[in-house]
Amino acid sequence: MGFEREKSETRVIMGEDEFNRSIDPILVKKGNVYTPAPDRDPHDINEHLKVGFEDVIGEPSTTHSFDRVWIGSHAVFELVKFVFYRLLTTLLAIPLSFVAGILFAVLSCIHIWVVMPAVQSCMMALPSVQTIWRSLTDTFIAPLFLSMGRCLSAISVKTTHT
């Protein structure tokens, strides 16, 4: 509850690359043997999912738990997040990618073979529809509103305050 004066930071490193690098002999100096991990989210579409322990749990400065409890809970949080993510992706990644592939294939097919031909047909028909609409409004609607305007223009309204 505050007896420890040093700041401690914990990190759980579970990446396979880190584990493999740690077992290499220290004295053997090689060039850069390991290639950097590929960026699996190059467009940052899942930026909002980068959640750390500090983003979820925070203690105000007036209330602190024991330092060992804080460090342990941080380690457990990171470990459980890592293990369950790996477990769920192992179970769900292939079936969900299969479903997503079918969904996007169907949407692409509908867009290419149904939506765009319908839009192009409407765009081709619109000039003739525009001509017909203009002639109908000039023949029926314009004279009606013109005569209504002439009839109603003779009306004058006077307001008096009493």
Image (spheres, rainbow, N blue to C red):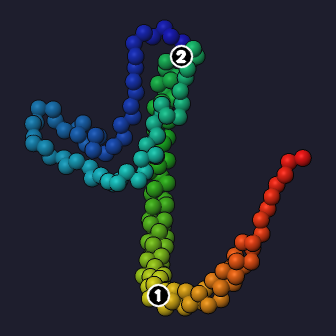
Q: Which residue is mark 1?
A: 127
Amino acid type, residue under disc 2 in the picture: Ser
Query: Is 92 situated left or right of 31 in this image?
Result: right
Residue appearing at x 29%, y 40% in the figure: 19
Q: Quadrant of the N terminus?
A: top right
Instruction: Confirm whether residue 107 shows in the render.
Output: yes
x, y (%) of residue 110?
A: 48, 81
Q: Is residue 87 above or below residue 143?
A: above
Q: Secondary structure at mark 2?
A: loop
Q: Secondary structure at mark 1?
A: helix
| First along the sequence among labels 2 and 1 | 2
Q: CA distance from mark 2 to mark 1?
A: 70 Å
Q: Give the farthest residue toward the right.
A: 162
Q: Is residue 85 above or below residue 152?
A: above
Residue 111 marker? none
Q: Is residue 114 above or below residue 79?
A: below
Closest to the observer, 109 or 136: 136
Q: Which residue is mark 2?
A: 61
Dot 2, how many residues are within 10 Å of its Cα: few (below 14), some (14-19), or many (20+)? few
Observer-side mark, 2 or 1, equals 1
x, y (%) of residue 6?
A: 39, 12
x, y (%) of residue 17?
A: 27, 44
**How many labels, in total?**
2
Instruction: Confirm whether residue 82 shows in the render.
Output: no
